[in-house]
Image (spheres, grey):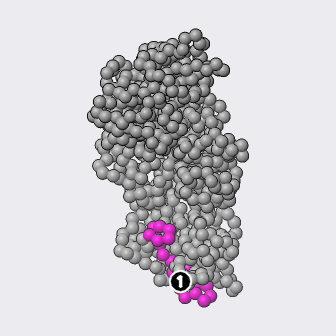
């Protein structure tokens, strides 16, 4: 590669520039217009006028050759393009700046060099707004021969766009040595910081293949695809997992949201409008938020958008997504800040998943300390690297960073973290910057564009459905109606052991306990979760000195008369919680032993407190604020002890297949 320096020689008006006679021309020429170091052209920067639509000429002197340097003068031309009647451009603060109110900002005609092909164009901007470059084979609207426009569809500060010639098969066939091309500044108020042009004597072979050896390649929201403007394979779908598996990705990334009734589903946006339609496949009218829908409403009233009817599936739950990853041999990357999603991923996938988050370091640390997980953790960053290594040390284990801001990823930074054993992920970078990051050493790639080597991109719906037929529906062997009875007077009713929790334990963040239901040949495990309402609360298995009072003791509170214990009931698929009964007692010194039923932790709609030592609630029930609460299939509810020194002797939950 040849280095350049700037020399100021006379202007040449020829379209095709020739290297000086009597010299040996190099195989490759690299011309860099670096606006960050100064104005690179021989002529001062002119302010464009209405007449500048025809183009304002500028020359640049390029030095080449080893030892005995030679020079050539290259002709450039700047115009305000085809849309604006006038546009100002200027040089200031290390950038060529175009100032306009809309339309194409401007164009720069790139020089053709006799005997050379234009092989690659790199363009970088420092604009704050959306800024896209286009490459075409004509200047303004004079000679529309191929009308090939390749648009860069991303814009961030420091964004790099790379065009490898040929950009299409048509250009490959028609590009001639010495041909000139035009770089278009496609959006308003662009600030161009650098343009690099690579010319070669040999005809361009297109973008060279990426070396993906040793890289962890993940399909962003699954391997979705579009047919025109419509989805063929929907994003965040089970089909997207299957397509990624068939193409050879290591895994898929997915996003997690809560429905109104706290069911975890896979969806990126806060609204469902982008990727879903009504169940009859008509378009959704008005914004519909995931958080405003119950799971039943989301499941029954909407389907994922697809041009293939077989792929018009309901929005999957996180559990369905994880189980499909396991079936397809895919490693899921959970882009989620919901701790419950980490618990479910660890339960289904073991350590074979990636925790991708940047919102709650304490929860991420619990993945290690409480879930005992050795999964990969990628900490998302957006504010630079000053404290990142300290954060990674706190996370521990197999971990690293991820960012959508390519400007952070200098080779020095990547090498420093990789040398310490940390991962570095580029997250949906623009294609040019994605390639640069991969070449500079990132090892995790979350991408819409990069595909595994040798992967087919023409896989049909029939092939997907043949390779991954829908699994048979799980057999529902549970009775039409059954009850779970927690009788603490007989000891600990859970699989885990004698005591529910030691008196000294502070289960503020919830502890899970498994109840094993048996009925003849049917055995099923159901999970309860216990939460202390206040940090000062404890709970434990209790037995009075005289042996007469035995049960689950919701211990003393520093602040009296507050709910001291919350029990989250199991979520059972296709079953409604129809009735809740309890028997309670009072420890010495207690004034009451009341319980309440609520539809959410730490609040929600609640029943009036039971005034007796026994109480039964039947759905639907009317809450204390006069709201009628219906039972929802698969939903968890909360039973709370309302008084300190409360003893729960027994708790009975009745479930039914009918509402």
Does residue 136 lie above or below 612 as drawn?
above
Quick one: quadrant of the C terminus? bottom left
On the image, the x and y values in percent for residue 612 come to 49, 83
Nearest the eye: 89 or 375: 89
Q: Which residues are magenta?
A: 583-604
On the image, the x and y values in percent for residue 508 come to 60, 69
- Which residue is pictured at 42% across the width and 53% down the height? 270
- Determine which residue is flagged by label 1: 561
On the image, the x and y values in percent for residue 84 come to 29, 35
Name the secondary structure under disc 1.
loop
Does residue 449 lie above or below 394 as drawn?
above
Mark 1 is surrounded, within 10 Å at the Cα level, by few (under 14), some (14 to 19) or many (20 or more) other residues, namely some
Exactly how many numbered labels are in the figure?
1
Q: Quadrant of residue 170?
A: top left
Nearest the eye: 374 or 9: 9
Residue 577 seen in render: yes
On the image, the x and y values in percent for residue 195 come to 49, 32
Asked whether 594 falls inside the magenta stretch, the response is: yes
- Which residue is pictured at 64% across the width and 59% down the height? 366
Residue 251 seen in render: no
């Amino acid at each position: 590669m040849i280095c350049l320096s700037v020399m100021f020689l006379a202007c040449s008006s020829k379209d095709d520039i020739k290297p000086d006679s009597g010299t040996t021309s190099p195989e490759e020429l690299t011309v860099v217009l670096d606006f960050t170091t100064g104005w690179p052209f021989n002529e001062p920067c002119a302010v464009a006028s209405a007449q500048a639509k025809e183009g304002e000429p500028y020359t640049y002197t390029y030095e080449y050759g080893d030892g005995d340097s030679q020079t050539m003068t290259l002709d450039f031309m700047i115009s305000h393009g085809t849309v604006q009647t006038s546009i100002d451009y200027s040089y200031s603060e290390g950038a060529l700046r175009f100032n306009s109110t809309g339309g194409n900002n401007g164009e720069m005609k790139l020089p053709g060099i006799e005997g050379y092909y234009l092989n690659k164009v790199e363009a970088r901007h420092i604009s704050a707004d959306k800024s896209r470059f286009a490459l075409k084979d004509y200047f303004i609207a004079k000679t529309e021969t191929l009308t090939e426009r390749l648009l860069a569809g991303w814009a961030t500060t420091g964004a790099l766009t790379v065009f490898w010639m040929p950009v299409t098969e048509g250009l490959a066939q028609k590009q001639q040595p010495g041909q000139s091309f035009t770089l278009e500044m496609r959006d308003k108020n662009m600030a161009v910081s650098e343009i690099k042009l690579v010319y070669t004597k040999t005809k361009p072979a297109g973008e060279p293949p990426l070396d993906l050896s040793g890289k962890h390649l993940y399909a962003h929201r699954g391997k979705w695809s579009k047919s025109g403007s419509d989805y063929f394979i929907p994003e965040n779908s089970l089909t997207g997992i299957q397509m990624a598996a068939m193409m050879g990705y290591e895994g898929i990334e997915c996003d997690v949201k809560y429905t109104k009734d706290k069911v975890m589903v896979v969806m990126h946006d806060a609204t469902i409008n982008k990727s879903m339609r009504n169940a009859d496949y008509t378009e959704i009218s008005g914004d519909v938020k995931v958080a405003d829908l119950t799971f039943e409403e989301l499941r029954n009233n909407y389907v994922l958008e697809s041009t293939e009817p077989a792929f018009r599936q309901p929005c999957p739950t996180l559990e369905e997504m994880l189980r499909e990853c396991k079936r397809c041999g895919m490693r899921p990357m959970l882009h989620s800040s919901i701790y419950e999603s980490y618990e479910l991923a660890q339960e289904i996938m073991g350590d074979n998943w990636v925790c991708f988050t940047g919102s709650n370091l304490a929860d991420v640390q619990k993945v290690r300390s409480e879930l005992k997980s050795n999964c990969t953790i990628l900490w998302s960053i957006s504010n630079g690297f000053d404290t990142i290594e300290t954060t990674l040390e706190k996370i521990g284990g197999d971990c690293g960073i991820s960012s959508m801001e390519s400007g952070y990823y200098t080779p020095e930074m990547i090498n420093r973290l990789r040398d310490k054993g940390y991962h570095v992920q580029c997250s949906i970078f623009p294609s040019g910057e994605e390639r640069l990051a991969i070449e500079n050493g990132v090892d995790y790639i979350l991408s819409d564009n990069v595909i595994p080597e040798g992967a087919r991109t023409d896989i049909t719906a029939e092939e997907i459905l043949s390779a991954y037929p829908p699994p048979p529906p799980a057999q529902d062997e549970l009775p039409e109606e059954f009850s779970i009875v927690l009788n603490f007077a007989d000891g600990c009713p859970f699989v885990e052991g004698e005591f529910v929790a030691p008196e000294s334990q502070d289960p503020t963040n919830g502890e899970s306990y498994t109840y094993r239901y048996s009925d003849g040949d049917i055995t099923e495990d159901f999970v309860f979760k216990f939460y202390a309402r206040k940090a000062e609360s404890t709970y434990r298995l209790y037995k009075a000195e005289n042996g007469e009072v035995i049960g689950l003791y919701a211990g003393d509170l520093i602040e009296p008369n507050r709910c001291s214990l919350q029990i989250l009931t199991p979520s059972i698929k296709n079953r409604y919680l129809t009735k809740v009964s309890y028997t309670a007692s009072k420890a010495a010194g207690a004034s009451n032993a009341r319980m309440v039923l609520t539809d959410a932790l730490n609040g929600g709609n609640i029943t009036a407190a039971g005034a007796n030592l026994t109480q039964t609630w039947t759905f639907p029930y009317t809450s204390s604020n006069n709201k009628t609460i219906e039972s929802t299939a698969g939903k968890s509810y909360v039973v709370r002890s309302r008084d300190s020194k409360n003893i729960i002797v027994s708790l009975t939950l009745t479930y039914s297949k009918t509402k």
